[in-house]
Image (tube, coloured by chain):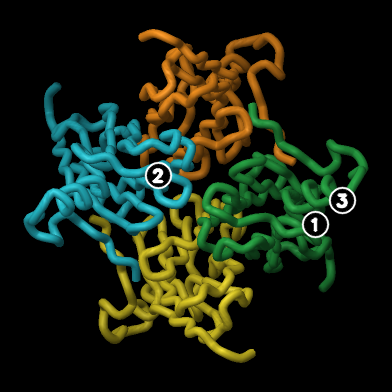
Chain colours: A cyan, B orange, C green, D yellow
Amino acid sequence: MPNIFSINDFGEAKNELQKDYFDRHTPVIQCISEARPGEILRIRVRVGTEYAHPHEADHYIALIQLWNRETLLAEARFYHGVLCNQPGNVEVEFTVVMPQVSMNLTALSYCTKHGLWRSQPHAVKVGTEK
Amino acid sequence: MPNIFSINDFGEAKNELQKDYFDRHTPVIQCISEARPGEILRIRVRVGTEYAHPHEADHYIALIQLWNRETLLAEARFYHGVLCNQPGNVEVEFTVVMPQVSMNLTALSYCTKHGLWRSQPHAVKVGTEK
Amino acid sequence: MPNIFSINDFGEAKNELQKDYFDRHTPVIQCISEARPGEILRIRVRVGTEYAHPHEADHYIALIQLWNRETLLAEARFYHGVLCNQPGNVEVEFTVVMPQVSMNLTALSYCTKHGLWRSQPHAVKVGTEK
Amino acid sequence: MPNIFSINDFGEAKNELQKDYFDRHTPVIQCISEARPGEILRIRVRVGTEYAHPHEADHYIALIQLWNRETLLAEARFYHGVLCNQPGNVEVEFTVVMPQVSMNLTALSYCTKHGLWRSQPHAVKVGTEK
């Protein structure tokens, strides 16, 4: 099966090259951590924080998936024109309605050369007040 | 071939029911209209403005595509859990780098019961200054 | 909106170059024309018949959709490794159960350089006997 | 992250119920095991062998992915109409050109209620003669 790489699997990055490699492939979830059932959440997923990933015809981030535990919520697919062939950070913002119970979100991203990568999990607890 | 419906094809909505039906299926592009080459654009696509669409297992908005003329830039796919079975407006925000030439954007959305719908075109001109 | 090209829109091909261009972008549906409700159908969609399409990183057939009238039945997505960079004919075979009523199938294909193309419609009538 | 279930992870099925559950979620790759570089391969992926999976609006196999090691080759997406709401075995046949080196294929399938499942790996060696 395809490996699912995670920055955690590699231990501490030993040098700039490793930091770059790990960072620019890892999706990061940006979202609040507590919400009331029915509340509309903006969930942003960005691949890479400090380091940019190439976006060329034969090497680009093609896919982001947003999971809540074992359930696929949404996917975004990018074609190679989306960043005009310049290095950058692919990102997408999904709009999701908070369910009655907590969510445990994970994002996956797929690089056409370096495979499948996963984010840190991001919990959204059920809040009782705004 | 599948029809691609557009609010324009129907003429003026004759009543509340038609307004609702047209509005809640039509994707709307929210984006600035002028940008410098290389500038990072946030392009939001929302299905429906004033009226909410169901989001049930057998009737929901499953797909949004963002086109620049004949070129597919990005797609978002939604599963039926994304709005927790309550009516609402599916939306997604893509991040796109402005090319050297103008863009003419269109969004398509797909409803699992009522087919394929298109937005009004949205032009983004090349600007010379910020 | 993106044009949806069809070999019919161009009239008769005037020369070899046009024949090649039209043929290698046009999806063709291969399927029986009559089936009993509940029968399992193999529906093959092939892009191009006599002419091969490039399959390079920045120019390939990325997507085939199979529609029954206004309803999307299935989609296949191809990455540029699938034909090993050699020209060829992308194809996929879907398995579909025949409904209680006739189907009117259309396939769409998307070329990353030359946009969206549609097949001839293919009707599958309801048959009463095997 | 989402678990990726495999029939191997569960050990021997203890009863009919478990056999059914494991079997109807597991994708199976059908393909020859040796091919010459450039040869056209038909790779069939079928979810379930002896047991049928439901195909209802809120419970169906939505996605099959075909991987060669860490590289995504192709994906098929099914909408809930494809099997007309009757239990069955979703399947798809991809056409892939054999590369210069061996392939190690895996298929993933996604059930909208029971998550992501993987097939046994299937090796295709490079053959020298037809």
Which residue carries the number 1 mark?
A: C124
> Between D128 and A46, which is closer to the camera in this rendering?
D128
Which residue carries the number 2 mark?
A: A75
Q: Is residue D4 above or below residue A49?
A: below
Residue A6 picture quarter: bottom left
Marks 1/3 same chain = yes
Chain bearing tag 3 is C
Left or right, A121 with respect to D69, comes to left
The quadrant of the image that shows the N terminus of chain A is bottom left
Marks 2/3 same chain = no
Which residue carries the number 3 mark?
A: C16
Q: Locate residue C126, reporting x and y percent.
A: 81, 59
* Residue contact between numbered discs 2 and 1, judged by CB atoms under 8 Å: no
CA gap, disc 2 to disc 1?
A: 33 Å
The amino acid marked with disc number 1 is Val
Q: Is residue D46 above or below residue B83?
A: below
Q: Is residue B48 above or below residue D89?
A: above
Q: Is residue B80 visible?
A: no
Q: How many marks?
A: 3
